[in-house]
Image (spheres, rainbow, N blue to C red):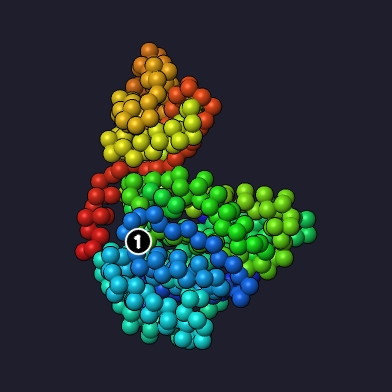
Amino acid sequence: MAVGDNRLDWFPIDGIELNTLAAGIRYQNRDDLLLFRCAPETLIAGLWTRNHFPAAPVILARAHQAKGGARYLLINSGNANAATGDAGLQDALSCCQAVADVEQVDVSMVLPFSTGVIGERLPVGRFQLAAEDLIAGLGTKTWLDAASAIMTTDTRQKVACREVSLGARRIRLTGIAKGAGMIQPNMATMLCFIGCDAKVQQETLQDMLRAATDLSLNRITVDSDTSTNDAVVLMATGRSEVDLDQDLKAQAEFQDALTDLMLELAHGLVRDGEGATKFVTVEVAGAATDAQALEIAYSVANSPLMKTALFASDANWGRLAMAMGKVATPFDAAKVDLFIGDVCLMRGGIKNPAYQEDDGARVMAAEEILLHINLNAGDCSETVWTSDLSHDYIKINAEYRT
């Protein structure tokens, strides 16, 4: 059961068509294949997993995208095509070729993406049988349909949109994401696809995607695991005629909108974390450096003991102190203040004399919890978002392949 509500609003993006269908790749009676087709002038920026076991589609998509001119994104759920060696690479290429043959384009114009079980070969024949219908139906499905087709252990779709108003002109953005487990981005953990109609140069597009990712998808964790298949892609069709390289004010507003959209999607991944019952914000302030603040925030967010205390609604400040203190970078524990919501648990490195267990229980019982740590050592701060660790997380992953 996901934590909190989520919006399902989306805008059509001029220059991007999509279609989904049920190919039977792993799931039955649900769409599990998605194709985006972009207008010829579209530019595509991408970021990929830093896992040292990258999946075949990651390797191939990265190579195809580097050539420039990509116009198609082919995504399947249910099978990750990871740890499949040279055969997996050939499978990914064959799936791309099925689309390229129908559209009569070079295979490098197709970028493949996969998510699901690791270590199994793709059923390439199902892609080949689906290719003609998938292309024939382009434009008949919505971004919400796309968000559904890429789900695995997700319990709900993640879709978001934004509009940047610039007088009589506007830029529209819509994005989808999937992911509920194997979530701690090391660029971005999950699959995320964003379309916009801005006009922009390739280098600028890539820089904006990287900046937005660092403040959103690279600030979340469910279980500290970086997937083999992570990818985030930003497609810019240029149809709005707002040139972000010529209008720096528009570029700044677009950057803010992109970051905000991606933060909504990132929060959606955490809220739908496998077995999650809590949405947790970990703020670290007063650090000497941003790196120190982020190190401590992740140490707390990823601590199994802390995450199980969150599930139990137990304001165990000792576990928080432990999780903070196990980092490599030293800090002065005698200066640390610690809050859960508006309740001060620790002041100057020791238990707050005014702290009452009933107050801790009250704030920990909420679905949405703020953990605030002040090191009182500098002016730097960072925020990470996470979930608790429940019985259902173990059950979902124990049964994932059965």
Q: Give the residue at the far right of this rendering.
A: 168
Task: Tell me what residue is drawn at x 39 percent, y 54 percent.
Answer: 50
The percent position of residue 238, horizontal first and vertical second, equals: 66, 67
> Is 341 drawn above or below residue 253 in the view shown?
above
- Judge whether 369 appears above or below 63 on screen: above
Q: How many discs mark residues in the rendered view? A: 1
Give the quarter of the image for residue 89: bottom left
In the image: residue 145, left or right of residue 310: right
Q: Mark 1 points at which residue?
A: 54
Residue 359 in which image quadrant: top left
Q: Which residue is drawn at 56% across and 73% down?
A: 69
* Point 51% across, 51% down: residue: 213
- Name the spot of residue 284 as percent of width and height, x first: 46, 31
Question: Camera-side residue: 331 or 270?
Answer: 331
Does any portion of residue 244 appear in the rendered image? yes
Say if 241 sits above or below 221 in the image.
Answer: below
Within 10 angstroms of label 1, few (less than 14), some, or many (20 or more) residues?
Answer: some
